[in-house]
Every structure is written in C-alpha cells, then in structure tokens.
Amino acid sequence: MSKRLQELERIYDIVNENPKKVPRDTRKYFWKLVRQIKRNPKSDHEEIKKAAEIRNILFRVDRGRTVRIAPVVALQFLLGTLGGLWGYIWSLGFPLDWSNPLGWTMADFGLFVWKLSCVIFVIFTYYPFGRLIAGKWAGILFDGMCRDEFYEPTLKIDYVSFLHAPASKRKWFFFFSGLWTIITSLWVGIIGFVLAGDLTGFIPVVVLGVLEGYAVLNGGTKHAFGEMGHYNREKRIERVWKKRLAILQGEDR
C-alpha cells in the first residue's frame, strides 16, 4: 500500500465517522492528495477509488443527494423548450424597435424583460446538456443530477471515471461545459434575429462571453469561477501531468 493510499484511508475514517464536522485542515489535505493523483499520468486505481469514496461523502454533505438523470433532463428539456424557447418565439410576434432602444415605452421594456427571461430560462434548463456532450467525448460518466454552487441544475461527475481521464480531457470537459451556455444563447439569438430581427438573445452571449473570458484570462489567479474556474485548475494540473508523462515515455524507450 502506497503512503498516499494510507493517508486516504486515514482521511476516509475521519470523514465517514462525522461527515458534517470534518476539520478544515483535513479537507484541504484531502484535496491536496487529489491534485497529486491528477498530476500522475500513471493512475493508481486503488487511490482513485478511495479518493472517490471520500469525495462522495463530502459531496452529499455540501450539495445534498442526487437524482436520476433521465427523468430530470427530460423534464428540463420540456420546460426549456415549451416554457422558454416557445415563450420567446411567441413574443417575437410583438417586435421591438432595436434602432432606438432609448425610445422604448414601459410596455416595450416589459416585453424586453419577458424575452430576456425566456432566453435565460432556456440557458438555465439546457445547461446540463453541455456536460453530457463533453462527458461523452471525454469518457467521463455521471452519478446523477444535483445542484451546483450557484444552485443551478447540473450533473454530478462520477469521480472514478473523472480521475482516470487524461488531464487534457478533464480540462476540455470543463471548457466545453462552460462554453455551452454561450452556444445555447447564441443559437436562440440567431432564431430571434432570423425570425424577427430581434437582438435579445445576443445580450446573454455578450455578458457570458465577458464573464467566461475574464475567468479564462485570469486562470493564474483564484478569481476564476464556475466551469471555467475548473478549466483553469485542470489546465495548471495538465502542465505538470504532461511533464511527468514525457519523463515516463522517455523511460520506456
């Protein structure tokens, strides 16, 4: 048994005994060990398995339980399509004068708020599909539906498959998941523009683009957040992972 596995076993006993009162130092040390595992191109399955067990206990305390993916995703798709997308398309029958927004009446502003709310609702309900698509490509599985740190619906990652995935795939998994919100808003914006010359859908594209871009550009700091924050973390880990992979490949020659 490796020293790291011994430490994970010790942490597991602490976490399992009282999940709600795990010392902060213990949590920090656990995530330090996880980062060490991620940087290792030659994965140790037993270490990964034990780390996943600990993470799942902590996850239940922090985020609550998970539910089955299929029914929730189906419900979100229906709500997003019928309530958000079709609500937005219906509102296109009441055009806004985008050449002079300052001349809008209170009724116009109310209509704009309705349209923007519909677009945001589509982004909110379609958000998990980004992770599904990225996970399929990266070989990362999911345990179920849960909430994220912003109380949005998301997919709980199966940590064993996640830690076994190459560092590069983990990085791009989070990047695409974050980019998906922009993609969703963009195609809704295109629909509105093509059907009625409406620009509402492009507003979240700009806002999300700025936020996501800021997160990516600030990858060397701790100010990144959301999926792009995870992307930045995995990007830093990937640098070490690649160096160690090169050493291992050189030893095998």
Image (cartoon, rainbow, N blue to C red):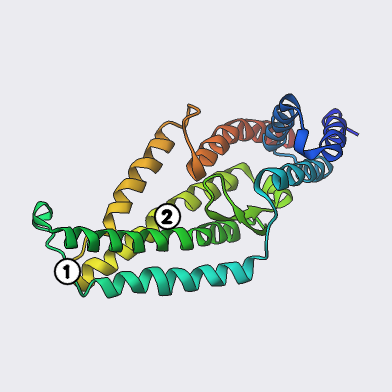
Q: Residue at x 33, y 65 (%)?
A: 188
Few, some or many residues within 10 Å of mark 1 (<14, 14–19, 20+) = few
Assign the C terminus to one quadrant of the image.
top right
Indicate the position of residue 121 as horizontal and vertical percent values.
Answer: 41, 61
Indicate the position of residue 116 as horizontal and vertical percent values.
Answer: 30, 59
Assign the N terminus to one quadrant of the image.
top right
Q: Are marks 1 and 2 in contact (CB under 8 Å)?
A: no
Above or below for 232 versus 163: above
In the rendering, which numbered label is found on residue 181? 2
Foreground residue, 86 or 141?
86
Above or below for 188 versus 216: below
Using the numbered discs, state the Cα–Cα distance from disc 1 to disc 2 in whole angstroms: 25 Å
Q: Residue at x 43, y 37 (%)?
A: 215
Report the amino acid beneath label 1.
Pro
Q: Name which quarter of the figure residue 5 lies in.
A: top right
Query: How many marks on residues?
Result: 2
Please indicate whether residue 107 sits to the left or right of residue 247 in the image.
left
Q: Residue at x 47, y 30 (%)?
A: 223
In the rendering, which numbered label is found on residue 212? none
Foreground residue, 44 or 14?
14
Q: Name which quarter of the figure residue 238 lies in.
A: top right
Few, some or many residues within 10 Å of mark 2 (<14, 14–19, 20+) = many
Above or below for 36 versus 50: above
Above or below for 149 versus 75: above
Q: Residue extending furthest right?
A: 1
Indicate the position of residue 250 as horizontal and vertical percent values.
Answer: 68, 33
Indicate the position of residue 178 as horizontal and vertical percent values.
Answer: 47, 49
Foreground residue, 147 or 30?
147
Report the amino acid beneath label 2.
Thr
**In the structure shown, which secondary structural element does the residue marked by tag 2 occupy?**
helix
Who comes first in sequence, dot 1 or dot 2? Answer: 1
Find disc 1 in the rendering and name its residue: 95
